[in-house]
Amino acid sequence: MDLTLRVWRQPGPTVPGRFVDYPAQDISADASFLEMLDVVNERLSARGEEPIAFSHDCREGICGSCAMMIDGVAHGPVRGAATCQVHMRVFADGSTITVEPWRSAAFPVIKDLVTERSALDRIIQAGGFITAPTGGARDANEILVAKDAAEAAMDAAACIGCGACVAACPNGSASLFTAAKIAHLGALPQGQPERSRRVLRMVAQMDEERFGHCTLFGECQEACPKLISIDVIARMNRDFLRACTSPPASAW
């Protein structure tokens, strides 16, 4: 395949960026999008040019590192897949592909396609935990978990924290991410003691990080590589209202 990449290049967070065109020739249709970028970078390095900076780690759709917009779509044209799971055969031979970083005030650009997403980590740190007694390990079957609760928790826990929901949302909201982290703990019996405190702290942190507010536009669930439903946002809103109307003494 012979392609043209139109890539956002930005040397640093305080330096203006611009789009630069690069040829991507003789690319295997079976190569992943990141493997294609590797080939382009090898050729740039061979010519003494600066390679394109982008984030990656597992390359298995697990870590959420490979965050980038491809032709205006978070993670690219394949629904339910991270960038590393997108293969070049989904693009037409001879096409021009535009690649840029997440666009959000809460995700400042570090370099090229790499953005600072520690705001998501701080939301988790604000309340994404459960109280666990210390001492000997408890029997795995000692606390019974209903099947529907376990399935709901597992569906929400599938979130990989990539930030695609933020990048796709017209408001730049992190509600899908935050709600998923709240839901996967709140659905389990082990997560009940902190349920009110968790939602109050995590929503407050989300607001502090300059994310926009959710208007249930729905683009977040379409962009999510794990196809997490906006149902978790409804659950978060319900928990938040309950916590606000009768907050526990230790909520803050």
Image (cartoon, rainbow, N blue to C red):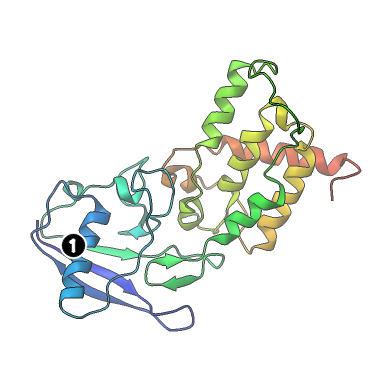
Specify the quadrant of the image occupied by residue 213: bottom right
Is 26 located above or below residue 85 in the figure?
A: below
**Rendered residue at 65%/53% (across/down):** 123
Which x, y percent locates residue 211? 61, 60
**Rendered residue at 81%/40% (across/down):** 243
- Residue furthest toward the bottom? 15
Instruction: Determine whether the residue tagged by mark 1 lies in a helix, strand or loop.
Output: helix
State left or right for residue 69 relative to residue 248: left
State left or right for residue 121 relative to residue 74: right
Q: Which residue is denoted by mark 1 in the rendering?
A: 39
Name which residue type carries label 1. Val
- Residue furthest toward the front? 136
Which x, y percent locates residue 79? 34, 42
Is 153 located above or below residue 241 in the figure?
A: above
Please identify the quadrant where the N terminus is shown.
Answer: bottom left
Which x, y percent locates residue 84? 31, 49
**Rendered residue at 63%/36% (across/down):** 183
